[in-house]
Image (tube, rainbow, N blue to C red):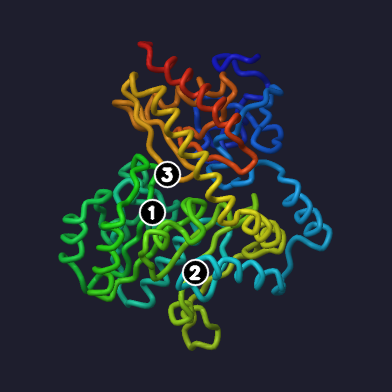
Amino acid sequence: MASSSTPSRAQELSPLLPGGYTRGSLVVGTHSPQAAKGHGCYVIDGDGRELIDLNNDFTSLVHGNAHPAIVEVSRAAIEDGSAFGLPTHWEHEHAQILVDRIPGAEQVRYTCSGTEAVMTAVRIARAVTGRSGVVALRDAYHGYSDSVIGTAGPKSRRGVPVGLLDELILVDVNDIAALEAAVSERPEGLAAILVDAMPNRAGMIAVTPEFLQRVRELCDEHGILFIDDEVINLRQGLHGVAAERGVLPDIVVTGKIIGGGYPAGAVLSSREIMAQFDPERSDPLEQGGTFAANPLMLRAGAEALRLFDREAIARLNALGEQARSSLAEGVERLGWTVRGEGSLFRPIPPDDLTGPVTRRLFWAAHERGVSITPTAMCALSTPMDADVVGRAVEGLVDAIESVSKPV
């Protein structure tokens, strides 16, 4: 068994990559475990160790690794051709599944990531309203486009024009008074209110139904568009979090689970709003992407969504409740809390949300056979059962005990 303090060959970082990483979200130190392969709810690292996968590629692998049905349709898609410069009938099939799930949605535009989906939605809102301001939740993360990266905090604002940052107004999660004040300051200048109903970087605090309802009311009062970021949260309910709580947004953006393990993003809205893309207009919005809506993603994603029906969602959410309850019971004596909903959860240390303790927890969990994200957000997958979840929680409790001791 390799020690986290003495990297094996599989843990060496490449000098060909900035800082040794391809994605900033992967950073866990000057070295890192590497994934070699995965099956079901397990990932095999570069040292050959099998770990319970609670990372699931940052929540996107809702069916775990190499699900047989998704592998089968992926293989067929590759054999038929993985990308074309022409439309395919798979676009209609996948879009129909999404439209059937998202209340109020009538049309879909595809992108290659959640980042691009949010970026596109903000541009739609600005085009429809003729305004530029966006209200969003402080410390939420909506991707790394210039238009919204400022929500993630001061460290995320380097390289972004001041003019774009000035168009972004931030309010705390569930602070209705601050929301109302932000809108009242420039009601005629706001294009959108952008909400993630359980933003991880903000501490995974669930947005209340009352806050969502007030967003809807303010948007209706002032001609602002409500953008609902369901890139992560679509796994929480068949219709997405906002709709499940009785609030219908104007635009829904999603990604992750809709791609079946392949790069995916989507923007959904009414025909009226999506008409901004109509090529018959004199001034259609520009939006493309060489690999957007490629048939490999569409076919695998459609299969993943069909498998993730209401029954599967309810079962996975029940396992999530088991995980949160058991983990909270095991760590509350250490001053930790556990947040989350549905099939997502995150242990929160008493005085450190994203710093050294959380990073040490990543390594401590890895050493105990559990793979989590660097922020400690955990996502369940459908191959898991109560026994697997119990073992994962046991490993996390032990890991949290170890990092809670004085260094």
In the image, 286 versus 97, the foreground residue is 97
Determine the residue located farthest toward the right in the rendered image.
Answer: 79
Quadrant in which the C terminus is drawn = top left
Query: Alpha carbon of mark 3 to alpha carbon of mark 1: how far?
Result: 13 Å
In the picture, measured across the screen, residue 204 lies left or right of residue 167, that is right
Q: Which residue is mark 2?
A: 268
Query: Mark 1 belongs to which amino acid?
Result: Asp
Q: Position of residue 213 (x, y in %)?
A: 28, 63
Labelled disc at residue 17: none
Labelled disc at residue 196: 1
Q: Secondary structure at mark 3?
A: loop
| Label located before the other in sequence (1 or 2) | 1
In the image, 192 versus 283, the foreground residue is 192
Q: Position of residue 203 (x, y in %)?
A: 35, 39
Whether 47 is drawn above or below 262: the answer is above
- 3 or 2: mark nearer the eye: 3
Within-10-Å neighbours for mark 2: few <14, some 14–19, many 20+: many
Residues under numbered marks 3 and 1 in contact, where contact means CB atoms less than 8 Å apart: no
* Res 310 → quadrant: bottom right
Labelled disc at residue 341: 3
Query: Mark 2 belongs to which amino acid?
Result: Leu
Residue drawn at 31 percent across, 56 percent down: 209
Residue drawn at 40 percent across, 43 percent down: 200
In the image, 276 versus 381, the foreground residue is 381
Question: In this rendering, does residue 157 appear at all?
Answer: no
Q: Secondary structure at mark 1?
A: loop
Whether 301 is drawn above or below 354: the answer is below
Query: Mark 3 belongs to which amino acid?
Result: Glu
Query: Alpha carbon of mark 1 to alpha carbon of mark 2: how far?
Result: 15 Å
In the picture, measured across the screen, residue 241 lies left or right of residue 177, that is right
